[in-house]
Every structure is written in C-alpha cells, then in structure tokens.
Amino acid sequence: MSRSVWKGPFVDAYVLKKAEAAKESGRHDVIKIWSRRSTILPQFVGLTFGVYNGKKHIPVNVSEEMIGQKFGEYSPTRTYFGHVADKKAKRK
Amino acid sequence: MTGSNHLNNWTCVGIVIGAHGVAGGLKIRSFCTIPSAIKNYNPLKIEDYPEALHFRLISQSHDIFQVRLEAIKDRKSAHALKGKLLFAERNKLPVIDKEEYYYADLIGLQVKDQNDDPIAKITNVNNYGAGTVIEITHNKSSKTIMLPFNIETIPVVNLDKKYISLKIVPQEFLKAQNH
C-alpha cells in the first residue's frame, strides 16, 4: 500500500538540516547520512550524499531523475564482484 | 570488481565456461557491456596460453557464446581450458570521449594530495546508479573510502603519468596520516 499523499514525503529531520547547511556553505563535501529510508527531495539536487550501506558511505550524486526515490536505492548492501572489461566512467 | 585482470596491454573481457561438442568447441561468457562486442576484440588471449587465438562465433545466448578455435581440435583440450580468462588487446577497445575513462585504466592509479605526494591508490571503480564512484585505499593504513568521480573532487586525471589529484584530502585519511 502506498503512502498517503496528505502526509507528504518522509525525510529524516537531520538529513534536511545537513543538506541546508551544505547548500548555505556552498562547499562540495560529501554529506554523510545513515538514513537510507529518506526520500530524495528536489532541494537535494546537485548535492552529494554519502549513504551508509552498513559498512561504508557510498557517494550518491543527486540528479533530477532521482527525486521521489529513497537514498538506500543507490547504496547497495551486498558486494558484487564483477569485471571491468570495457566499462567506461564519465567525469562530470 | 576485479582489476587485477588488467595485464599490461590486455584487458579481461570474458571467461571459458566449458567445452562444447566433441570437435574442440568452447563455451565462453562475455563480460563486455554489450556482450556481442567480444567478437570485435578478436584475436583473444587465453590465460596461461602462449599466443592470441582467433575465435569463430557459432551461436549466442545472452552473454554466452559457442566458439571454435583452429588450435583446439578435441574435447579434452577444450575442457582443460575451463575457467581460464580471456583477454583482449587494450588498443582494440573503442575510442572514448575526452572526459571518459575505462575502468581498467583507472584501477591502480596513484592518488596524490594537494602537495603532489602520493597518499593512496585506486582499488576499484563502480557505478550504483548515482554517478561513478572510485574506491581508494590509503598507502599506510590500508583504510578504504569511496569518492565521487567528478571534477570538484578529482580535478586532475593523468593517465600518462598514472595519477589522479584530490582537491581536498578526506578527513579519514588525514586521521590515518596523523596516527
């Protein structure tokens, strides 16, 4: 069952505070958070969060397409050993 | 993700998963982003095999291919290659854009601080859906952290001199250096 619209999206209060502080400072530091359940809000776009996966903080660079999803979706908790082969990384 | 498969100018692109038929055919799994791209990297080198061999593709099912090699004529020799990795020549990989890098090229690069001192090494590169992430391991404490792969964090990537530079050294590494 989906969450009632009248409640609005759920975000842990400390995540909002940290995000506001980071925006005001204008620095590009990774904001460490443990709240995987928090919803990604429009005001988080452009910020980089370090989302805890139970072991370490995985950097999550928030973009517009991610709004409405949860932080935990971008920080997998299981280790996957793949192969590099011809995979490419783009520096933005 | 295994970076150790990057041997000099060869990049790991697949693995032999078994023999196929009685005439020396092989079953291989492609690790390429687009599995069928493996046929563009011919000839491939088999792990512990002296020379590179030409593969002829017979059929494909997802990322598994049935292939034939001229050098392998019987099932016994084909079966002996099970589990061996397949390597493609690095210069056979497609040309990439200015700000694009192959994972295989990034893994193993030195990480330098603002004073140009090497402090860590890139041990892994990943993308979990929110941008590329590099995993770096501190030289002294072997502490590992993850950083976003962007210009704000990593202003310099020099593949010729095999290093990247950090704009700000992470707090975790500063603590490790002081201990």
Image (spheres, rainbow, N blue to C red):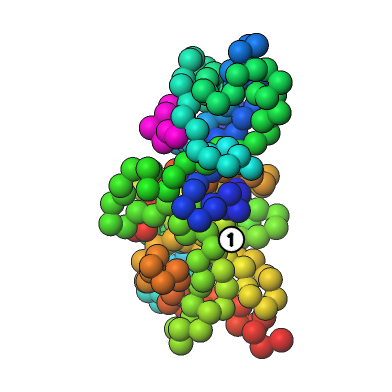
The image quadrant that residue B72 belongs to is top right
The residue at 45%/71% (across/down) is B163
**Location of residue B139 (image quadrant):** bottom right
Residue located farthest toward the left when viewing the structure as drawn: B98
Q: Quadrant of the N terminus of chain A?
A: top right
Quarter of the picture containing the C terminus of chain A is bottom left
Is residue B80 positioned above or below B142 on the image? Answer: above
* Residue B103 falls within the magenta-colored stretch: no
x and y percent of residue B66 in the render? 54, 18
Where residue B55 sits in the image (x, y, percent)? 48, 26
Q: Is residue B51 above or below residue A31?
A: above
Secondary structure mostly seen in the magenta stretch: helix
Question: Does residue A28 show up?
Answer: no
Front-lying residue, A4 or B35: B35
Q: Secondary structure at mark 1?
A: strand
Task: Decide if residue A8 is on the left or right side of residue B17.
Answer: left
Do we see residue B111 in this rendering? Answer: yes
Q: Which residue is mark 1?
A: B123
Q: Nearer the viewer, residue A13 or B166?
A: B166
Few, some or many residues within 10 Å of mark 1 (<14, 14–19, 20+): many
Residue at image coords 60%, 34%? B15
Q: Residue at x 54, y 63 (%)?
A: B108
B40 is within the stretch colored magenta:
yes
Q: Amino acid at mark 1?
A: Thr
